[in-house]
Amino acid sequence: MNALALLLSLGCPKPSPELPPEPVVEAPVAPVSQHRWGPKAEVRGEVDRRFYGEWMLSGSTAKWSIFEDEGRTWILGIDTGDGEQFVVADFVAEGATVRFASQMPSTGHMTEQTWALDDQGRCECRIQGDANVTIACLRPE
């Protein structure tokens, strides 16, 4: 199942091309309490194409999809343990780095994540929240 089909099967509306683009903000990412939350987030900036597809975080049940639909790039996250969908905000790309905020609705747990690709295509994720950790982002098998 591709990311758009997954998104639609979860009851999310198909992204509408009529929506105005979000304004580009040059300032640093706002504190988590100031984010605009939604079931998915559209990117601001240019995403390195190597990010497209599905990712799992090492030692986690979180599964993230970065995909393009009708010329727009989105991120969507699901906990594969129970199927609960993350809400996400402020998806920003800067070359081989992407940043976004995520929250699990059932627990209220919020994080800010920064993913970086190296020259070999390996991805490292820095998570800031209750605990600050750096882990590998992996392609699911």
Image (spheres, rainbow, N blue to C red):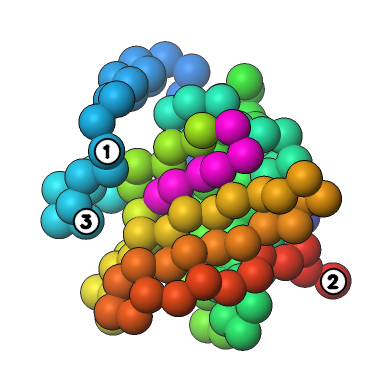
Q: Amino acid at mark 2?
A: Glu
On the image, which quarter does residue 28 sit in? top left
Mark 1 or mark 2, which is nearer the start of the sequence? 1
Left or right, 138 with respect to 92, comes to: right
Which of the pair 52/129 is nearer the observer? Answer: 129
Q: Residue at x 62, y 39 (%)?
A: 96
Dot 3 crowding, Cα within 10 Å, few <14, some 14–19, many 20+: some
Is residue 115 among the parts visible in the rendering? yes
Q: Main secondary structure of the magenta part?
A: strand
Q: Residue at x 67, y 58 (%)?
A: 123
Find residue 28 and name its label: 1
Q: Give the vertical position of 89 relative to 23 (above or below).
A: below
Dot 1 crowding, Cα within 10 Å, few <14, some 14–19, many 20+: few
Chain part drawn in magenta: 95-100
Q: CA distance from mark 1 to mark 3?
A: 12 Å
Q: Position of residue 56 (x, y in %)?
A: 66, 68
Q: Position of residue 66 (x, y in %)?
A: 62, 46
Q: Residue at x 58, y 73 (%)?
A: 135
From the image, state whether disc 3 or disc 2 is nearer to you. Answer: 3
Find out whether residue 96 is within the magenta segment. yes
Q: Amino acid at mark 1?
A: Pro
Q: Which residue is mark 2?
A: 141
* Local secondary structure at mark 3: helix
Q: Give the vertical position of 127 relative to 130 (above or below).
A: above
From the image, state whether disc 1 or disc 3 is nearer to you. Answer: 1
Q: Position of residue 91 (x, y in %)?
A: 42, 41
Q: Give the vertical position of 124 relative to 82 (above or below).
A: above
